[in-house]
Image: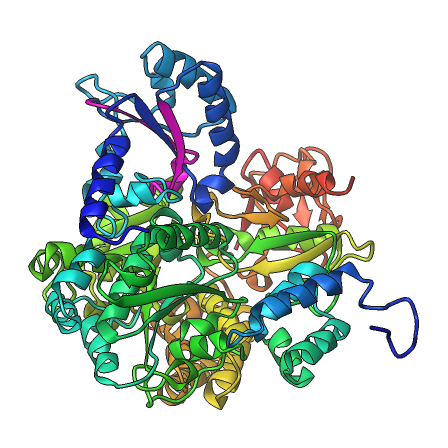
C-alpha cells in the first residue's frame, strides 16, 4: 500500500526513466480494438518473439492504446532515447522480422514501411502528418504513448497527482469551484456544466452517494470513449475518485458496453492495480477518504446512455427512462444522490486539476472551452480519432485533418450527433464547432461521431437508417417515441419504395415536431433530428423520390433501373453474369435488360468492360 | 437436489447449473445483481431459455416475469439457441454509408436466413450489430472473434463463410 505523496513521487521518478527509455528502446504496438481488428495481435507476438530471439534485452515491447489513425493500422512506433520516434505502418509478422533485424539490430530504420521521408531527408512519423497538425490532444494525450495495462506508465505522465492534490490540498468545495471556473461541459452530448452538476449532488445530505461513469457509448459510428478506456483507463478511475471526493460519494460505478471486451478487460486490470497501490480503497493518501469502483456491463440497449435508464439498468431492471425531476443529483441510483459523467468528460478532469481552470479556458471557445474528440468516419480518406479545440470549423476537420472524401468524390453532408443529430450540408462547413452552434444549425454535438457522406449517399436513405435505429432502440415507455418514430419510419419506407406523396412530407414534419415536443427522454426528443435536418437541407432529394419516383444517387433499389446504352459491343458478358437471366441479345448486337425480371443486383454493371450499363 | 420428474436432467449433476449457482452465491450480497446473473447465465449456457430463467428466479428471488422482461429488453440476451458461429454485420453509420447493406444482402442471400435467424444446420446465426469500432476498415463483419474488413467487394464473402463450414 502506498499512501503518501512522497511515495507517489518516488514511483513517478522510476516510471519516467522507464517510459523515456533512457536505457535501451521502447516499442509500442497500437492495440486498441481497431488495431486488433486490423491484425495487431500477431504483430505484437512476433515482435516479442523476434526481439527475444535476437537477444535484445534492453528493448521493451508493449501494447498501447489508439494512435488515432485507423487507416494505417496495425501501427508500431519505436522510441529510442534522444532520437525522433519512428512510425511503421501496415505491419504484419513478416515486416516485423525485417524491422527487428534491420532497425533494432543494425540501427537502420526500414524506410519502406514508414510513412516516408520528409523533404529534409528525415523520416516522417505520425506527428508530421497534416492529420495531427491541427489537433490538440488533451484527452487522448496518453493514448498511443503509454501501456494501458501498466499503472507505472500512467504514474510517469503525472498519473494520480491530481487525486493526491485534491485529497491533500483541497476541500471538496475547492474541487467543485475549480470545475465550475474551468467551464467544462459534459462531453456526452448535452453539454451540461460539470461543476454545476457536481454542486447539486454535493449540496444534498445523504448516507450514501454515487458517482457513475457513463461508458455506454451507443451512437453508431462513435468510438471515442472506447479509445480512452482502452488507451488510458486510469485517467477515468482517477477522475471518478476526484468526483467522488467532491460530491461526497464513496462508491463509483463504470457502466460500460459489453460489446467493448478490450476496454472492460483493461478497466479490470487498472482497477486492480489502483487498489494495489492504494489509489482506490480505504484512506486514500492518508486523507481519510474511502473510494472504490465497480464495473457494470450493459447488455446492448442504446437508451441506457440516457441517465435515468442507465440507473435503472445498474439497479438490474429494464433500461427505461423516467421523468425528471427528480434529477439523479437529488434522487438517483437506489434513490441516493448520484452524478453521472461521460468518459471523455472525466478524462479532462485530472488535467484541469493539475493545470488549472485558466489553462483549460485558454483552449476552445468562450462558452465551450477545451477540446472535443471526434470519431471521423464514413467516406473520408483519413478515418480515425481526432481531438480538436472547440471552435475549429467543420471544414478544417473534414478537409485539413480528414483529407477530403475518398476516391475524389464530392462532399455532400456531414452527420454529427449520431441518431440524435443532423446532417449538415456544405453551406454549414464554416460554422465553428461548439455545443451551441451545432444546435443552432439543427444538429448537435452528441458524443462525437462525425460521419462524412459523399455524392453517392442518398439522404432519404440515411434518414431512414437512423429512424430504423431509433425505432429499434426506443424503450417503449412513452407513446410519442414508441408509436411516433414507428410511423415516421413507415412513411420513409414508403418514400424510398417509390410510393410516397407530397402529403407524406407534411405529415412527416408534423409528426417530427410532435415527437420532439412530447417525448419523455432525450432519445425521443432528438430522434426526428436526422429527418428534419435532411428535409431542410436536401428537400430536393425527397421531392425527387416522391414526385419523380427517382433516387438521384441510385441507392434506393426500388426506384432504380439498369439500362444498356448504345456503347454496348454485344460481348455477352453481362448476360452471362446476370443471375436471373434478365439480359438478352445476340453476339455483337446491343443487349437489353428485361425490367420485370431484373433484381437490380448490379452484377451486369460491374462486369461491363465498356461502361455501357447505367443506372438511373 | 432431485427434479420433481425424477429424470436425468438433475440440475445438481449439470456442471453448468453448478457453475451458475456458485456465481449467484458469490454475488448474492450485492445490490442490483439481476443483470449480472443473467449475463453470467448467458455466458455459461450460450442463451437463457425459460428453464434457466426459472433456475435464476428461484435462486435470486426475482419473479420470472421480470427476468423474462429483462431478457427480451436487452439485445444481448438470446432466449433461443444460437448457431455455432455468430456473424455480426456492423450496421454502424460509418459502415452503412460505405455499403454495409450490400454486405448484409449478400450474406442473407448466401445463408438463406434473415437477420436474427439461425441456419437450419445450426452453423450460423446472423445479426446486425452496432458499431464495432473499426470504422477505418468499413464495411466490417465479425464472425465469432474474427473481424473481416474492407468488404467493398461482396464477392469475397462466400469464401469467408466457407472457412467456417469445415
Report which quarter residue A83 is drawn in: top left
Name the foreground residue: A530 vs B38. Answer: B38
Magenta range:
A59-82
Query: Seen in the image, is A558 located left or right of residue A407?
Result: right
State the residue lying farthest toward the top.
Answer: A106
Please tell me which residue lies in front, B10 or A604: B10
In this view, the residue in front, A289 or A590, is A289
Q: Is residue A67 magenta-colored?
A: yes
User: Does the magenta segment cover residue A75?
Assistant: yes
- In the rendering, at what x and y percent does residue A557 appear? 58, 60
The type of colouring in the image is: rainbow
Q: Is residue B40 left or right of residue A342?
A: right
Total labels: the figure holds: 0
Spot occupied by residue B157 in the image (x, y as percentages of width and height): 65, 43
Residue A495 visible (yes or no): no
Q: Residue at x 92, y 77 (%)?
A: B5
Residue A343 on image: x %, y %: 33, 61
Q: Is residue A556 above or below residue A44?
A: below
Is residue A422 visible in this depiction of the protein? yes
Is A14 placed left or right of A459 in the picture? Answer: left
Looking at the picture, does residue B35 appear above or below residue B131? below
Whole-percent x and y of residue A480? 46, 88
Amino acid at each position: 500500500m502506498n499512501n503518501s505523496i512522497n511515495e507517489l513521487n518516488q514511483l513517478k521518478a522510476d516510471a519516467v526513466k522507464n517510459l523515456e527509455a533512457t536505457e535501451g528502446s521502447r516499442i509500442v504496438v497500437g492495440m486498441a480494438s481497431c488495431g486488433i481488428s486490423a491484425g495487431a495481435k500477431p504483430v505484437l507476438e512476433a515482435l516479442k518473439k523476434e526481439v527475444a530471439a535476437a537477444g535484445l534485452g534492453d528493448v521493451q515491447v508493449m501494447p498501447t492504446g489508439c494512435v488515432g489513425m485507423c487507416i494505417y493500422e496495425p501501427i508500431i512506433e519505436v522510441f529510442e532515447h534522444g532520437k525522433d520516434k519512428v512510425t511503421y505502418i501496415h505491419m504484419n509478422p513478416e515486416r516485423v522480422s525485417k524491422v527487428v533485424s534491420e532497425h533494432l539490430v543494425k540501427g537502420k530504420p526500414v524506410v519502406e514501411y514508414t510513412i516516408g521521408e520528409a523533404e529534409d531527408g528525415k523520416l516522417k512519423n505520425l506527428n508530421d502528418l497534416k492529420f495531427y497538425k491541427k489537433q490538440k490532444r488533451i484527452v487522448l494525450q496518453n493514448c498511443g504513448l503509454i501501456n494501458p495495462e501498466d499503472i507505472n506508465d500512467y504514474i510517469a505522465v503525472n498519473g494520480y497527482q491530481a487525486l493526491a492534490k485534491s485529497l491533500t490540498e483541497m476541500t471538496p468545495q475547492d474541487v467543485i469551484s475549480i470545475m465550475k471556473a474551468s467551464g467544462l461541459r459534459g462531453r456526452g452530448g448535452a453539454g451540461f456544466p460539470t461543476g454545476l452538476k457536481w454542486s447539486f449532488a454535493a449540496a444534498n445530505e445523504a448516507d450514501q452517494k454515487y458517482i457513475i461513469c457513463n461508458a455506454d457509448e451507443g451512437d453508431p459510428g462513435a468510438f471515442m470513449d472506447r479509445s480512452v478506456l482502452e488507451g488510458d483507463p486510469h485517467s477515468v478511475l482517477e477522475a471518478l475518485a476526484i468526483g467522488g471526493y467532491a460530491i461526497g460519494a464513496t462508491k463509483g460505478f463504470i457502466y460500460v458496453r459489453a460489446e467493448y471486451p478490450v476496454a472492460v478487460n483493461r478497466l479490470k486490470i487498472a482497477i486492480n492495480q489502483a487498489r494495489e497501490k492504494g489509489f482506490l480503497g480505504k484512506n486514500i493518501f492518508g486523507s481519510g477518504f474511502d473510494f472504490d469502483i465497480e464495473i457494470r456491463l450493459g447488455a446492448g440497449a442504446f437508451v441506457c446512455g440516457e441517465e435515468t435508464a442507465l440507473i435503472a439498468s445498474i439497479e438490474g431492471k429494464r433500461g427505461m427512462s423516467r421523468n425528471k425531476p427528480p434529477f439523479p443529483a437529488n434522487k438517483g441510483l437506489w434513490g441516493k444522490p448520484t452524478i453521472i459523467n461521460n468518459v471523455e468528460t472525466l478524462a479532462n478532469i485530472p488535467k484541469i486539476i493539475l493545470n488549472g481552470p485558466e489553462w483549460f479556458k485558454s483552449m476552445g471557445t468562450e462558452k465551450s472551452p477545451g477540446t472535443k474528440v471526434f470519431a471521423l468516419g464514413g467516406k473520408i480518406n483519413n478515418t480515425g480519432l481526432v481531438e480538436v479545440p472547440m471552435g475549429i470549423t467543420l471544414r478544417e476537420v473534414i478537409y485539413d485533418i480528414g483529407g477530403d472524401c475518398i476516391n475524389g468524390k464530392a462532399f455532400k453532408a456531414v452527420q454529427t450527433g449520431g441518431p440524435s443529430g443532423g446532417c449538415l450540408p456544405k453551406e454549414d462547413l464554416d460554422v465553428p464547432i461548439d455545443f451551441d452552434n451545432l444546435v443552432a444549425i439543427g444538429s448537435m454535438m452528441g458524443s462525437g461521431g462525425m460521419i462524412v457522406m459523399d455524392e453517392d449517399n442518398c439522404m432519404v436513405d440515411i434518414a431512414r437508417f437512423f429512424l430504423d435505429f431509433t425505432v429499434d432502440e426506443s424503450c417503449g415507455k412513452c407513446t410519442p417515441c414508441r408509436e411516433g418514430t414507428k410511423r415516421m419510419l413507415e412513411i420513409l419506407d414508403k418514400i424510398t419504395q417509390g410510393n410516397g406523396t407530397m402529403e407524406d412530407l407534411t405529415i412527416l414534419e408534423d409528426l417530427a415536431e410532435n415527437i420532439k415536443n412530447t417525448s419523455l427522454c432525450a432519445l425521443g426528443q432528438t430522434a426526428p433530428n436526422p429527418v428534419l435536418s435532411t428535409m431542410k437541407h436536401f428537400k430536393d432529394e425527397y421531392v425527387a423520390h416522391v414526385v419523380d419516383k427517382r433516387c438521384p444517387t441510385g441507392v434506393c433499389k426500388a426506384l432504380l433501373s439498369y439500362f444498356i446504352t448504345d456503347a454496348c459491343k454485344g460481348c455477352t458478358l453481362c448476360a452471362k453474369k446476370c443471375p436471373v437471366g434478365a439480359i438478352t441479345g445476340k453476339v455483337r448486337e446491343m443487349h437489353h435488360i428485361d425490367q420485370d425480371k431484373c433484381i437490380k443486383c448490379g452484377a451486369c454493371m460491374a462486369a461491363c468492360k465498356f461502361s455501357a450499363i447505367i443506372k438511373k | 437436489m432431485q427434479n420433481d420428474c425424477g429424470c436425468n436432467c438433475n440440475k445438481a449433476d449439470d456442471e453448468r447449473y453448478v457453475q451458475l449457482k456458485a456465481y449467484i452465491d458469490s454475488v448474492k450480497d450485492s445490490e442490483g445483481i439481476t443483470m449480472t446473473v443473467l449475463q453470467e447465465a448467458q455466458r455459461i449456457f450460450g442463451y437463457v431459455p425459460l428453464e434457466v430463467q426459472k433456475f435464476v428466479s428461484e435462486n435470486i428471488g426475482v419473479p420470472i416475469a421480470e427476468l423474462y422482461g429483462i431478457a427480451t429488453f436487452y439485445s444481448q440476451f438470446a432466449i433461443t439457441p444460437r448457431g455455432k458461429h455468430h456473424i455480426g454485420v456492423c450496421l454502424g453509420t460509418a459502415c452503412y454509408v460505405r455499403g454495409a447493406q450490400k454486405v448484409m444482402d449478400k450474406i442473407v442471400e448466401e445463408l438463406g436466413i434473415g437477420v436474427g435467424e439461425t441456419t437450419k444446420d445450426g452453423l450460423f446465426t446472423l445479426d446486425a450489430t452496432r458499431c464495432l469500432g473499426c470504422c477505418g476498415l468499413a464495411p466490417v463483419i465479425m464472425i465469432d472473434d474474427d473481424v473481416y474488413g474492407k468488404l467493398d467487394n461482396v464477392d469475397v464473402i462466400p469464401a469467408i463463410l466457407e472457412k467456417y463450414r469445415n
